[in-house]
């Protein structure tokens, strides 16, 4: 993902503080909304799709970019669950939610390293993958080519989509699972989906949320996210695993978020006895933004805060 983002940035920027004046004639883009009807967000629209002239500041100089546009309608599909493996003894489900640009992953059972790592970490319940339309490298590139400065707007639109998936569409899927307890693990924007699932989960639901694990979470870590309030919707722990050097979160998330940092690069800024922050920076040793970067260390990290191995040994 980092290579893709860097390539798009380099295609539309000049190095050395030069002012770039560009006029984009986009033309008309049409489409249809399918399934969930999630729409492109007003926040992204405010970045890109406002009428008239949009003014940007580059290296403390103002560049006026005139955009001839019509609003792009995005095609959306309803999120769905894919069962990867049945339970090995626990009446529990772990649902993994991947992040930005993972839309093309329609055969997640091929991600053997992930599922094997979770089993080695002691997980004995069922394994599921929550698919959502998280964009793809092709659609990101097309958006940037059409709109010129579309990368950040594309990211912001999918941030809002992750929120809507978590608040509106995930609960009907998860509450229909046969397992009585559900653990969530989300990476990047998938962690954002997981946060909003936790936030919107009814405390009176038949199915209970147990643990929520965030990897490189694209969610603001500040107290205004009411972490201590929403953790009361789960019965276990909220484990936030972060990398201070994550290049994508440090740039793409903070730039449009008024420099407020996400929990994927810093600890959650709120104390609660069931909020656990784990700094994986020294283990990963790079700014790579990928789930794969965590996998060699995930068994060790989960063992520090969760009791999976102890519980699975009691089954033997």
Image: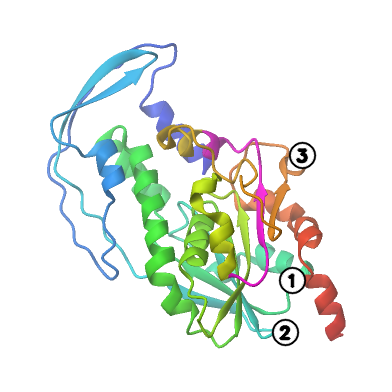
Callout 2–callout 1 Cβ contact below 8 Å? yes
First in sequence, mark 2 or 1: give its number.
2
Is the C terminus in the top left, top right, bottom left or bottom right quadrant? bottom right
Q: Are discs 1 and 3 less than 8 Å apart at CB?
A: no
Residue 225 lies left or right of residue 34; in this view the side is: right
Residue 179, position as x, y percentages in the image? 59, 85
Q: Which of the two residues, 10 or 181, is positioned nearer the viewer here? A: 181
Relative to residue 105, is residue 251 depicted above or below?
A: above
Q: 260 above or below 87?
A: above
Q: Which residue is mark 1?
A: 119
Q: Is residue 237 magenta?
A: yes
Image location (x, y in percent) of residue 13: 38, 23
Q: Is residue 20 shown left or right of residue 315?
A: left
| Residue 241: percent from left, percent from top | 67, 51
Spatial CA distance of label 1 from label 3 is 24 Å
Density class for disc 3 (Cα within 10 Å; few <14, some 14-19, many ≥20) is few
Mark 1 or mark 3: whose residue is earlier in sequence: 1
Front residue of 4/235: it is 235
Q: CA distance from mark 2 to mark 1?
A: 10 Å
Identify residue for label 3. Answer: 282
Task: Provide the secondary structure element on which disc 2 rests.
Answer: loop
Task: Provide the residue span drawn in magenta.
Answer: 234-250
Q: How many marks?
A: 3
What is the crowding at mark 1: few (fewer than 14 residues within 10 Å), some, or many (at least 20)?
some
Q: Looking at the image, which is closer to me, 1 or 304?
A: 304
Residue 212, picture quadrant: bottom right
Which of the colour schemes (rainbow, by chain, secondary structure, one colour) is used? rainbow
Element carrying mark 1: helix
Q: Which residue is mark 2?
A: 88
**Numbered circle sitting on residue 28:** none
């Amino acid at each position: 993902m980092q290579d893709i983002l860097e390539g798009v940035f380099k295609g539309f920027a000049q190095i050395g503080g030069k002012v770039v004046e560009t006029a984009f004639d986009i033309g008309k883009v049409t489409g249809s909304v399918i399934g969930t009807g999630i729409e492109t967000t007003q926040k992204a629209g405010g970045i890109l799709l406002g009428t008239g002239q949009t003014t940007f500041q580059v290296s403390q100089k103002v560049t006026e970019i005139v955009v001839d546009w019509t609003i792009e309608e995005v095609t959306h599909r309803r999120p769905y669950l894919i069962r990867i493996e049945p339970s090995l003894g626990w009446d529990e489900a772990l649902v993994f939610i991947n992040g930005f640009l993972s839309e093309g992953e329609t055969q997640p059972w091929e991600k053997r390293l992930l599922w094997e790592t979770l089993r080695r970490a002691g997980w004995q319940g069922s394994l599921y993958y929550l698919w959502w339309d998280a964009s793809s490298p092709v659609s990101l590139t097309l958006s940037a080519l059409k709109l010129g400065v579309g990368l950040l707007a594309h990211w912001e639109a999918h941030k809002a989509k992750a929120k809507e998936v978590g608040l509106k569409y995930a609960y009907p899927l998860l509450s229909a699972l046969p397992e009585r307890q559900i653990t969530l693990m989300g990476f990047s924007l998938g962690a954002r989906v997981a946060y909003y699932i936790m936030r919107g989960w009814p405390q009176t639901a038949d199915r209970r949320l147990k643990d929520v694990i965030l990897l490189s979470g694209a969610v603001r870590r500040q107290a205004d996210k009411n972490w201590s309030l929403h953790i009361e919707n789960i019965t276990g722990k909220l484990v936030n695993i972060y990398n201070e050097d994550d290049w994508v979160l440090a740039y793409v998330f903070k730039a449009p978020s008024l420099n407020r940092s996400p929990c994927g690069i810093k600890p959650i800024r709120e104390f609660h006895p069931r909020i656990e922050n784990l700094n994986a920076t020294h283990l990963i040793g790079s700014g790579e933004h990928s789930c794969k970067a965590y996998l060699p260390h995930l068994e060790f990290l989960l063992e520090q805060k969760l009791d999976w191995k102890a519980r699975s040994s009691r089954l033997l």
